Amino acid sequence: MRQQIDQIRQAANGDRALHLIREVSTFHRIQASTGYRAAAEHVAKRLKHDGLEVKIRKYAADGKSWSLVQKMFLEWDIQDATLWLAGTGECLADFKANNLSVIQRSHPADFRNQPVDIVLLDRGDQPEAYKGLDLKGKLIFVRDHFQGFMDWAIKEGGALGFITDYIRDMEGIRVRYDLHDIYNYTSFWWKHTPDEPRTFGFVLTPRQGDALAQKCRAQLARHEKDKKQPKYLQATGFVNASLYEGFIEVVDSFIPGQTKDEVLLVSHLCHPRSCANDNSSGVSASMEAMKVIHDLVGRGVLEKPRRGIRMINPPEFTGTFAYLAELGDGVKRVKAGLNMDMVGARQSDRYGPIGLSCTSHAVPSVVGTVGALVMDEVKKNAPGHTRGNFVAMFNTAVKTFEGGSDHIILSDPAIGVPTPMLGQWPDKTYHSSGDVVEVIDPYVLQKSVAICAGYLYSLANLAEEDIPLVLNKARERFMTEVTQAINRAVEGDLTDQQLHDLVQQLTGYYLESNLWLEGFCSGKLGHKARDAIERENAFIRQTSDALWERYVQDHAPGFMPARVSVPEKYQYVPVRTAKSKGPPVHMDDFTLDDPKKARAYADYNRDWRSGLESAHAFDCVVQYNIDGKRTLQEIAQRTITEMGEGSVEYVHEFVQLLKLFGLVEVKK
């Protein structure tokens, strides 16, 4: 395996991948749009040129059909949009100059010949702060996220549309004025219900926003002194756009294997022009990885893989759900996956390492271990001062489960494709017009290509003789995670009981992950490999017991695990329904046209979800742990132990919400 990874590492080319980023990033790749379609056609053409089997899959974007738990939305097309400050000649926004100066998926509008008042709303997003203010037919200039104004200012107050200069601060990464001349990526996510407003919006940079806010206040002050003066500034403009029934596309390319089994690579193709790191880098690195494997196999450097290697480039989440819905039971031949999302930015000025986000404890497999093993080999960049030692020339991290992209769908046990993510975080210019090709480093990109291709081929060609190497790396990871947990307890970050639960859960996870190897190899392992797995698991049990006993002796003499008394309220067993495949990304889709569900979802967000740091990932893990056998208490305990936050009460409320949405049934 190591020799094959080294051959792949040498063949991977960061400059080729960078050229692809320059091409892909020129397309305005909003999900279900003409720009996205053009990008998909371009990617397919390039892959065909490289000799791969390629097809473009099409799915309805009609605003009414569902793909598993994802409601599809309408296609969008935009030709042009501008916003002018009336009477001044100052252009505030111009789509053709910067595509992010418009709120994506805006409805059409035309007020070029009828100036509209601009009302500054800068006291938060609660209606109480603006009592008595007439917003009907006006543009509202909001400095918080626009969604908080939608219901009361647009739907109820009759405001015409938005102007916003909002940019999300990210602790330790960026504040508003780090991106003073940058546009935030802002989008409507329409549900296509009868009462939905047909509104639009424009986006300003923080510098533009500060200047416009000052002008709005000055105009209001002039009005207060002289009532003959207009109260508000005015704007003229238009949005030439349309929403209609159309399609989304998923690019599907394939390297055949010796069997019908497959390893799946996914890298989402969507996001605005240019969005170079997110995710032109993931798409381009994945294309280069497929080319490298295809070429090496074609030249006879690598043997034809035992399992096929398939890549899909979907609109994030939406396209993956659609692809899986079409695949149906065919997903059973997909043994493992990898998600590539943001993998090429220069590792300086608050751009983070290339991170491997592994699977949840509820999804035991060796995919994270194989990814870490390949990463180790790719990091052998320069020799150290002693024989056999190497120094990495780029930063990496192996991390626990995180949410945020297509791997959460594939890794769901209801889908059954354990999938880690290779990605980069933090990213200073994430979801902004600052995410341009200039932030990309071809050196970092080459390393991501090598890790991706090395991982894909290693799993696609995994054989019995590779198992000792994988088991050895798994042992290293197990020891590292348990030791880190013990250190946290010694430092007071975990109680003795929490440490006990975590060590037990980690032990079970690694034991089950090693056993997963036989299923991955379709039950064809010989006695030697089975014996190796059995011996390794015996060693893990012994090591786990020894480490725990040593901790108790040194730090918790006399400790005994608590006996959990489970209230009857939490003794029920949730069971996922047939339609619950993949964690819902837009849970509000299940509330449409049902006030009871809408209130329940709003209450859950306000009273429970807002209190978690990693609510998205936490909710995914809850659903992963619902296996039809565990009680609510057991599901909660496993999720809390893995995620390090939450409560049984939270999990109960979330499961009750899933039940209300028809995604869970309950048995006693």
Image (cartoon, grey):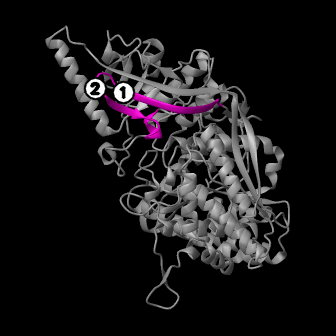
User: Residue 661 location in percent, x, y?
Assistant: 66, 27
Q: Closest to the observer: 74 or 50?
A: 50
Kindly check if marks 1 and 2 are in contact, taking CB atoms under 8 A apart as contact. yes
Q: Is residue 412 left or right of residue 556?
A: right
User: Residue 58 location in percent, x, y?
Assistant: 74, 40
Residue at the image position 50 percent from the left and 67 percent from the top: 442
99 within the magenta span: yes
Q: Which residue position holds label 1?
A: 84
User: Residue 219 location in percent, x, y?
Assistant: 22, 20
The disc placed on residue 347 is: none
Q: CA distance from mark 1 to mark 2?
A: 8 Å
Q: Is residue 344 visible?
A: yes
The three-letter code of the residue at mark 1 reads Trp
Give the magenta-colored segment's residue range.
73-102
Q: Label 1 crowding class (10 Å Cα cut-off): few <14, some 14-19, many 20+?
A: some
- Image quadrant where residue 121 sits: top left
Residue at the image position 43 percent from the left and 68 percent from the top: 554
Q: Provide the secondary structure element on which disc 2 rests.
A: loop
The C terminus - image quarter = top right
Q: Closest to the observer: 169 or 543?
A: 169
